[in-house]
Every structure is written in structure tokens, then in C-alpha cells.
Image (spheres, rainbow, N blue to C red):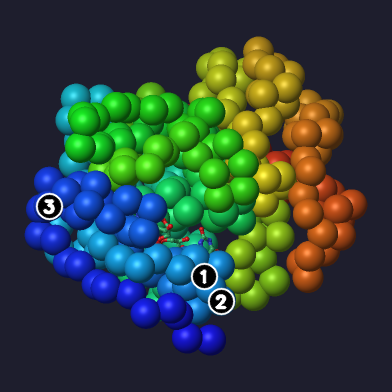
Amino acid sequence: MIPRPFEYHAPTSLPDALLLMNRYGDEAKLLAGGHSLLPMMKLRFAAPGHLIDLGKIGELKGIEQVGNEVRIGAMTTENELIWSPLLAQKLPLLVEGAGLISDPQVRYRGTIGGDISHADPANDHPALMLALGAAFVLRSASGERVVAADGFFLGLYATQMQPGEVLTQIRIPVPPAGCGWCYAKLKRKTGDFATAATAVLLRMKAGAVEEARIALTNAGPTPLRARAAEKHLQGKALSDAAIAEAARLAMSICEPTEDQRGDVQYKTAMAGEMTQRALRTAASRAK
Ligand SMILES: Cc1cc2nc3c(=O)[nH]c(=O)nc-3n(C[C@H](O)[C@H](O)[C@H](O)COP(=O)(O)OP(=O)(O)OC[C@H]3O[C@@H](n4cnc5c(N)ncnc54)[C@H](O)[C@@H]3O)c2cc1C
């Protein structure tokens, strides 16, 4: 399919991008890596009259540590996350997750900000952001606000982001030293989205779980935080029984949609399987 004709804009600063967004309103769409937007335009699910490309805005790129927080520009690509020595050291969960997204071609162009903003429940960053306790910086012509990832995702392709806002930065607290982590993802083949996936960040103390953060990908209309499973594990050793019960509790909140990757029962079972796998791997990495 061929997209509807559109006008292309390539601002070189954020204020210029915000001006264009104000000028064209509902007719405008932001373009990041284009890997989700362009297919939607070709299918005419999206038909913007104006595309505002964020690719030439330098301030939307980069990874830095400020105090106890890692700050990532929204236009940072998946490969830039994977290649970052800072992230390898401070946020290995994010590096592991980014490395499991699609294939190298997609990872060269796809951005962390686009993956989050698109809010497809099959996208991997949303659940990773919940597990990592991230916050998002949203900028508009009228100012800036910072919104927690927890509660940001409202439904299929729906977030708290308002018209006229741009996601500029992702802020992630550095987990305490010794945390275990894992992103366990089941996909049918390289380049596919998750049939089911689970992100785990785990803090252990004296052989027991001090804090577990567990988030599920593609198990419902939004990424899901498995709070009952987290609560169940708190203060316990990670025995087979504790892990199995956590997986059961995680499965109890799943509402996946049936598609070519499987029916509801299979996908729910795989969410439980990925939760068990992620917990065991995270425990083996915790110090
Ligand atoms: C073959 C294939 C396989 C894939 N597999 C996976 C996978 O396994 N896991 C996964 O997570 N993803 C997967 N993807 C999706 C890919 O990661 C996309 O890159 C991502 O969903 C969107 O990022 P983007 O930078 O391409 O954004 P775009 O497609 O350019 O934009 C997506 C949406 O977000 C909006 N947007 C973009 N940036 C901003 C911003 N800074 N502020 C506000 N709104 C913004 C756009 O207006 C648009 O509505 C796959 C894509 C393809 C083509």
C-alpha cells in the first residue's frame, strides 16, 4: 500500500519541532525510527498530512548518568543502547531487552522513545520500563512534566501523553549493586515480537527476596506489573514452590489476545513459563 501524500519536516531543534506540532495540530505526526509508524501509514491506519522527523534534533540523543539516574534521549536507537558501556554496567536488564528486539536492521533505526510512545503491548520497552521503575520526560509548548512509567500505559496504543507533547527523555534509577536481572522472551523466530516475555529485577538479602519487580510483555492491552507475584516473593527464599506460585499469580492477571502466535491459554501459560525462567536467571545473577 502507498501512504496518503504528506509534507515532510525536519526541524533541527526541539522548540522548532514544538512550533510545527502547534501549527499542524491533529494533522501532524512525529517520526522517529519509522518502524511502527510507516507500516501504519502504508496500511492507512495512520494518515498524517505532516510528518515531523525528530532525527536531526541532537538533544534527543545520548545516554548519561546524572546522580543516581541514567538519562536516555528518546531518539537513542536500540543498537546504541546495546553498545553503551554505561548501560552494560548500570542497567544490564535494558541491554538484554534491547538485544532481543527484532533483528539488527530494526535495531539500527528503531528508537527507545518510539517503542515507548507507540505503546504496542507487544513492544518490549514498556515492560522493561515498569520493571526498572523508569520515568518519562514529556515536553510541550507549555512546559515539561515527568511521568512515571507505572500508570503511563493506558491501553492499546494509548498513553498519558497529550496531543502536542514529545517524549524527550527516559530517566531510570540505577538499581542497587548486586541486583539480579533478566528479560526472558519467547519468540517464534528472529525478527518476531514476543509470544510472551517477562522482565525481572531482583534484590536479594541473606538468601531471601528483599524486592522483586516483575513486568509482562504482550499479556494484555498494556504491559502488566505482576504486583501479587512480587508481594508473594517478598521475604522468601526463591524455592521452586515460591517461583511456581509467583508464576501462577502472574498468569492470573494475563489477558492476551489470540493471534498467530497462539491462543489465550497457550500465551498465558508461556507468560508463566517466562516468569519462572526470568526469576531463576535473575536469582543466579544476584549477588
Ligand atoms: C519486523 C519488525 C519487528 C519488530 N519487532 C519488535 C520487537 O520484537 N520488540 C519491540 O519492542 N519492537 C519491535 N518492533 C518495533 C520497533 O521496535 C519500532 O522501532 C518501535 O515500535 C517504534 O520505534 P520507532 O523509533 O521506529 O518509532 P516510529 O515508528 O517512528 O514511531 C512510532 C510512534 O511513536 C510516536 N513517537 C515516536 N517518537 C516519539 C517521541 N519521542 N515522542 C512522542 N511520540 C513519538 C510516533 O509519532 C508514532 O506514532 C519491530 C518492528 C519491525 C518492523
Residue on which disc 2 sits: 43
Q: Amino acid at mark 3?
A: Asp
Residue for point 53% across, 86% down: 1
Residue for point 67% across, 24% down: 227
Mark 2, secondary structure of its residue: loop
In this rendering, the answer to whether 149 lies above or below 110 is above
Residue on which disc 1 sits: 40
Residue on which disc 3 sits: 16
Q: Residues within 10 Å of mark 3 (few under 14, many from 20)?
A: few
Q: Which residue is more in the foreground, 207 or 44?
A: 44
Q: Are marks 2 and 1 in contact (CB under 8 Å)?
A: yes
Q: Is mark 1 within 8 Å of ligand 1?
A: yes
How many numbered badges does the structure rendering display? 3
Viewer can see residue 70: no
Residue 43 placement (x, y as % from top left): 56, 76
Cα distance between the residues tagged 2 and 3: 29 Å
